Amino acid sequence: MRVAIAGAGAVGRSVARELITNGHQVLLIDKDPRAIKPERVPDGEWLLADCCELSSLAEAGLDTCDVVIAATGDDKANLVISLLAKTEFGVPRTVGRVNHPNNEWLFTEAWGVDVSVSTPRIMSALVEEAVSVGDLVRLFTFRKGNANLVEMTLPEDSPYVGTPAGLIPFPENCALVTILRDGQVYLPEADQPVESGDELLFVAPAEVEAELEKVLAPGHH
């Protein structure tokens, strides 16, 4: 897979190293000469260019990329890069870094962003996931499918403790994808009972999240 990363700061370089380790081709682009540090990512390609200019993106060969990651420290630039990548170069997948939570609402398909990554939101979700029992915690949003990856730690007083997963009346258009129990990952079989303290991971649209909470933990809502 060929990946272009706009923004060669600490975040961009870290992502690049990870992708290269996993066998992908990576091009790092930055307009600041001080950010061009090939010795930090020796197996990557480097380009000194302004990612917000069409000519620069054409020079980078964005039309040959499978993924573009807009990872600069400027939200406006990340939106422009994502939009140009999607509309002008037909890049199949774009990932946009959100630097300021107040701008998160802008990072949608309308701006060419397939997946937005907000560090504050991820950190708060991980904190909630670690301490919440009986509450649904949204971990990730799938832009394309209008669905979320959500988690609930099943409370002791859930009416479905000990009930086989296949007999629980989950809302329509909602799928239980994984059960985490005692450090192990289980694929949810229809005849497998859920237990108190299980971490249940679902893919569900936002409109059924409240209903899912009421089914699994009515005493908490």
Image: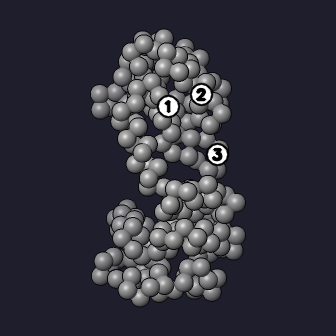
Residue 106, image x, y percentages: 63, 59
For the point 51% across and 86% down, the residue is 49
**Residue matched to label 2:** 210
Check if mark 1's residue and mark 3's residue have beta carbons within 8 Å: no
Q: Quadrant of residue 119?
A: bottom left
Residue 161, image x, y percentages: 43, 13
Check if mark 2's residue and mark 1's residue have beta carbons within 8 Å: no
The one nearer the camera, 79 or 189, is: 79
* Vertical side of 127 occupied by 201: above or below: above
Counting other residues with Cα less than 10 Å from the Cα at mark 3, is it few (<14), some (14-19), or many (20 or more)? Answer: few
Check if mark 2's residue and mark 3's residue have beta carbons within 8 Å: no
* Vertical side of 23 occupied by 190: above or below: above
Residue 32, image x, y percentages: 44, 85
Q: Name the amino acid, label 1.
A: Leu
**Residue matched to label 1:** 136
Q: CA distance from mark 2 to mark 1?
A: 8 Å
Residue 3, image x, y percentages: 49, 69
For the point 55% across and 79% down, the residue is 51
Q: Secondary structure at mark 1?
A: loop
Q: Quadrant of residue 132?
A: top left
**Residue matched to label 3:** 145
Q: Can you tell which of label 1 and label 3 is closer to the viewer?
A: 1
Q: Name the amino acid, label 3.
A: Gly
For the point 50% across and 60% down, the residue is 100
Q: Secondary structure at mark 2?
A: helix
Q: Name the amino acid, label 2.
A: Ala
